[in-house]
Amino acid sequence: MHEGTHAYRLAETVQRFGGERLGDPDVVITQVATLETAGPGHISVFANTRYRKQLEHTRAGAVILTQEVADATERSRIVCKDPYAYFARLSALLNPLPPVQPGIHPSAASDPSARVSPKASIGAFVAIGARCEVGDGTVVEPGCVLGSDVRVGRDCRLYANVSVYHDCIIGDRAILHSGVVIGADGFGLAWENGRWNKIPQIGRVVMGDDVEVGANTAIDRGALDDTVIEDGVKLDNQIQIGHNCRIGAHTAIAGCVGIAGSTHIGRYCRIGGSAMIGGHLEIVDNVEISGGTTVPKSILKAGTYTSLFPISSHREWLKNASHLRPLDGLVARLRELERRLLEPQEGKQ
Amino acid sequence: MHEGTHAYRLAETVQRFGGERLGDPDVVITQVATLETAGPGHISVFANTRYRKQLEHTRAGAVILTQEVADATERSRIVCKDPYAYFARLSALLNPLPPVQPGIHPSAASDPSARVSPKASIGAFVAIGARCEVGDGTVVEPGCVLGSDVRVGRDCRLYANVSVYHDCIIGDRAILHSGVVIGADGFGLAWENGRWNKIPQIGRVVMGDDVEVGANTAIDRGALDDTVIEDGVKLDNQIQIGHNCRIGAHTAIAGCVGIAGSTHIGRYCRIGGSAMIGGHLEIVDNVEISGGTTVPKSILKAGTYTSLFPISSHREWLKNASHLRPLDGLVARLRELERRLLEPQEGKQ
Amino acid sequence: MHEGTHAYRLAETVQRFGGERLGDPDVVITQVATLETAGPGHISVFANTRYRKQLEHTRAGAVILTQEVADATERSRIVCKDPYAYFARLSALLNPLPPVQPGIHPSAASDPSARVSPKASIGAFVAIGARCEVGDGTVVEPGCVLGSDVRVGRDCRLYANVSVYHDCIIGDRAILHSGVVIGADGFGLAWENGRWNKIPQIGRVVMGDDVEVGANTAIDRGALDDTVIEDGVKLDNQIQIGHNCRIGAHTAIAGCVGIAGSTHIGRYCRIGGSAMIGGHLEIVDNVEISGGTTVPKSILKAGTYTSLFPISSHREWLKNASHLRPLDGLVARLRELERRLLEPQEGKQ
């Protein structure tokens, strides 16, 4: 754990973020920590009653919790409605990003026509193409490559080895983790005379503000129109988003998800890890997809959807799975039994 | 959408690519576009009757469609057998790749023993190892790394941050998107005395001509013999191809597919997104695998194959899935009913 | 196949690694090869009786096999208990890594406060952050980026374009393949007032010794505590490991696996390709997960686990899958039949 470099009295914290303080107002908090590893200068969150034992034994200087469980500990504490959200804001306060060191590393290769803000920080071995724009306070780490005509907003952070293709637009406060690829060609092919012909991908990727993209995630440029990532979308690692997708504002997508081309996902959706979503689909707002689920058709009603085959021991699976293939036969046998047993009896009555 | 820089009269288009022109021969086309967004200088394709409404309202200067629906619009149009393939060729004409700017960027680090064509374009921060060869007209974008003894054919395009390991061979007209890794070690391990020993991976990756590889896809080198990607194979993003696989010519594989080691896939196959294909399998020519399907055994007959658990609301899934685990028991109960109901009756007759 | 540059007489091999030699002690071995492609200077392994035909026709100078099949060929051979492990060690002897060329490439950008061993080899366009440490004999290939305070042990190999975030620790003899990302932020978000707030990820990634990480795999840093990869863990390509996971020693994970945050996996586990493992789970030692399996709950008992929907032709799948959704109804119908048929009869007796 990274030791904190800032310090706040518990009373100051409550002044800043609200909540009710119980216990010593002068406890000094320098870092967030789990109940298990926290020491006297740390604050922890108790948001899940599964961790009651850890709460009992914690050495945390203070704990954030709800009114319902406010008496579960005698330690100094902050009582609030949403301890996890409170904890997030407090952690952001205690762990600010390092200050941006403006300037362009002498090894960087920036096209003379690019307009890089003097308040931006461009790392070693960064290549910036013709007519790019990079906004104030944006950090571009070593090894990133921006193609021509890329626009990156202000206060963004592109970690090492990010690649952004020509013409793509990154909004303000974006976070792109290492290995992210924005704007590669979509998988656009036309079959003719026994071979695939490539269809030029002339759309862009257009990203709103406050988007985070996890390590090694790829978002393809549009075939004709643009691929659009709306404000506040959060993407985890290893995700693939096909050409002409639209991801609605504030939707969160966990790792390893694949979304085929031209699918539109609504706002406030939550897609579980390794889900696979087919192409040309519409998924409305507020849909939750369970991890590992395959979505082969549109979802037009908010709710939670799942398609998992249940896990079992391999031995048990072998027995059960052997019945799945002839399930159609099983149904026919059941129908025959019903015919014999039920229909004649009903006929008799 | 990228505005076109070329212009063709509709009559010229038909002269070049065939098809029958209906309407104004002098309509000038500068770009392709969807029916929805097209303007007077654009040409659109009408290949799916689902978009009939968009056809009615389109402002496109011309439309490409089949004889069957030639009367569905009164706009200028090209009637042909395969509108989508026609569209692909026309789009390629209107959107040529930018001309190659030959030369080696002063920051690139090319081993003196490498032979880079003077007609190739090598970007900033490109590292080229000993004895590499790079062909005429090939573009290597910033941040790419070629290990020793790599051969890259002519008219290839390696986008930013591609890594190619030693000894691998890339054919002509290859397109490798950002983050692609060619020739990393396969997952070759031998268990001995409570630990894994690494097996040196001494094969290569050998790729034919006209191969496209999507962003962040990885193709491992062979353990002993080579991993082979035949001519015209098209790979989407985030794919993993294990050591000693062979992918047959003109096979297309969608995003997020994993193919374990030593599996041979035939020609003209189509593998849907997020499919998982086990190791040491044989899949013959002309096999289609549905997206999300797991393939644990060889497929020796052409056709379409699927293994999806159907999606439903989570509530409905909970009910249904609870019966899958004891499916073996259900079958036994059904059998017992049949024994009681059917066998005695048949015995009586 | 890479021709060998070392040569050993068969007698020397047995002296070094044990086993019983049958046939000519003076056969000179320069390389390993498959039975099919081997020539007189090559040694092959016969570990799978499926390859008996290849054994018959092999031109290999020598073959490694077990006592049980020692008579299956008359060629010179080494008889041992575990031919595959023997083969691995022999291949490592014949194919040593190229010797490390110590020194820092003039184009590399190493912070003055970094301590890079003079016996390490740092390639072109490598960026090394403040206070990093790089051990003896470690090779860092072109395009790698180490954030501040990264520690890399001795005799490691970081292939091209690897990214390691600040504070992470890589043990001795690690192999990180191209595109690997170590220490990106975990997917830590708190929902508040209609948007996601980022939770600072202040833990690290801490890796033990002898870890191998495949191409484009990403391991996220911990949210509060560290993400831990223990000694001897082997990770294939395209894997995603979420924040605060712990992977136990000598566990091997195949390609495209996703492991959500805070899951602890035991030692000596084997996870098949494209498996998906949910968050906050515990998986004990010696668990094997079949490829493509989704694990939504903890596994507290060693054994093999599976959750695959069986593959079939798409036509057959359509029939069977149509019964899965109303499986709950089927069970009710079966129950009704049992009630009618069995209960009255039992009541009569």
Image: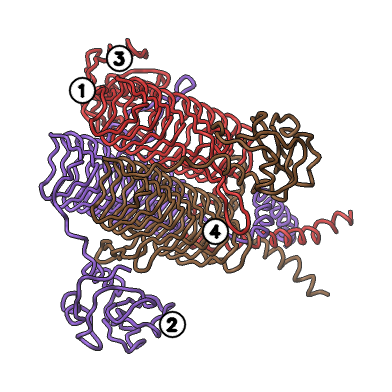
Chain colours: A red, B brown, C purple
B290 sits left or right of A167 in the view? right
The local secondary structure at tag 4 comes to: loop
Q: Which residue is mark 3?
A: A13
Q: Closer to the camera: disc 4 or disc 1?
A: 4
Whole-Å distance between the Cαs marked 3 and 2?
A: 75 Å
Q: Residue at x 26, y 30 (%)?
A: A58
Q: Which residue is mark 2?
A: C53
Labels 4 & 1 near each other (Cβ < 8 A): no
Between B316 and C192, which is closer to the camera in this rendering? Answer: C192
- Same chain under badges 4 and 1? The reply is no
Instruction: Tell me which residue sits at (37%, 76%) in the image.
Output: C37
Crowd around label 1: few <14 · some 14–19 · many ≥20 (10 Å): few
Q: Looking at this view, name the residue that lies furthest to the left.
A: C118
Distance from disc 4 to disc 3, alpha carbons, whole Å, reads 62 Å
Callout 2 secondary element: helix
Pointer 3 chain: A
Question: Which residue is tagged 1?
Answer: A5
**Image label count:** 4
Which one is earlier in the sequence, the residue at label 3 or at label 1?
1
Left or right side of A63 for C331: right
Q: What mark, if any, has residue A313 been given in the picture?
A: none
| Subunit under mark 1 | A
x and y percentages locating residue B318 in the rendered image? 58, 44
Above-or-below relation of A332 to A136: below
The amino acid type, in three-letter code, at marker 2 is Lys
> Helix, strand, or loop for circle 1?
loop
Give the CA separation, mark 4 to mark 1: 58 Å
Q: Nearer the viewer, residue C145 or A323?
A: C145
- Amino acid under disc 3: Thr
What kind of residue is marked 4?
Answer: His
